[in-house]
Amino acid sequence: MGSKDGMNYAPKGKPNPVVKEGEFPIAAAALDHGHIYGMCNGLVEAGATLKWVYDPDSKKVEDFVAQFPDVKVAESLEQILNDDEIKLVAAAAIPSERSALGNKVMKAGKDYFTDKTPFTTTEQLEETKKVVEQTGQKYMVYFSERLHVEGAVFAGQLIQDGAIGEVIQVTGFGPHRLNAPSRPDWFFKKEQYGGILCDIGSHQIEQFLYYTGNKDAKLLHSKVGNYNNPEYPELEDYGDATLVGNNGATFYFKVDWFTPDGLSTWGDGRTFITGTEGTIEIRKYVDVAREESGDHLYLVNKDGEKHYELSGKVGFPFFGELIKDCINRTENAMTQEHAFKAAELCLKAQKEAVVVTK
């Protein structure tokens, strides 16, 4: 797990193809964030055939080809969009540009899979909703902190099996390592990255909706601040928010850029889930001072206490389900409504956040 910063965190799992070679050709474009590697790993492991890559930056393309040597380099985005074989375009553009790119992809008759956060303004969200309605295409989002973490996948399975009863509260911690010198300019410009609750907060809100089975929630309070990075005045290095779901389940999360240098990985991401009949804690990327491996899950219920080590044991079913959804026009991996609602709530949390100062 030990990637030093989350920008280049790209999990690999066991190949579990749901389609034959050549049956589901995809393309990668807009390689602005390292998450594109995790997105493509997941799809290729599920059987997708990575046919094209395009980015105007030849160095980014070169690095991508080194990881995926069978991919062909497209001369333009149009070359990908005009290829009738391509079923889906995966992209990790600058956050403020994700919506416009997705709209273009969907209008070309292809499904779109974007890195989170999917939008930086509510205007983008509304426009994309219209395009989805007009085209019937999918605008799917890589919420990697649930979809690409075996502990988080397993937690969902336990909840569905009734292991902790009805979920009544979720607490999420999403610390990240800043590693400022390695970051691109857009990372520090709020208009481009969208703010901390909009950006890394989007993972958290998506998980809350999923684990509690909520289709909507109300924002009670949110706040953001820049505590220790005055040289980057537009960076928010801390944010938190409290929400309550339509079914009464509550949620508190905090996200920050304060991972200490001594931690073996980019962030000690954790999720705590309280149910009426038990509790779950997921230690996603590390078990501090005990194990550098991730995917540790602790379950306590009427049967006792249990510690699961899940790395390499659960897999990442989202990607195969997404491919099948694209082929069958179903919504088993994630509903469009769910992706849009998670985005809407993180935009709201960001917009209404109280700015705190030291």
Image (cartoon, grey):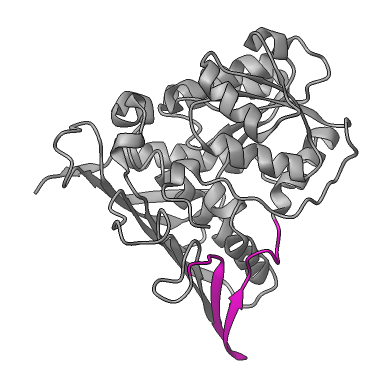
309 is within the stretch colored magenta: yes
Q: Is residue 117 above or below residue 83?
A: below
Horizontal side, residue 232 vs residue 143: left or right? left
Residue in view at x 40 percent, y 46 percent:
201
Q: In which quarter of the image is residue 260?
A: bottom left
Q: Is residue 212 depicted above or below 257 in this figure?
A: below
Q: How far from the left and from the top, in percent, is residue 345?
A: 43, 42
Which residues, given as a range, are shown in magenta? 292-315
**Left or right of 40 in this view: 35:** left
The x and y percentages for residue 126 are 51, 24
Q: Residue drawn at (54%, 35%), measured in percent from left and top?
A: 115
In front of the other: 259 or 302:
259
In the image, residue 57 above or below residue 187: above
Residue 303 x, y percent position in the rendering:
62, 91
Q: Is residue 276 visible?
A: no
In the rendered image of this protein, does residue 28 appear above or below residue 152? above
Q: Can residue 101 be seen in this view?
A: yes
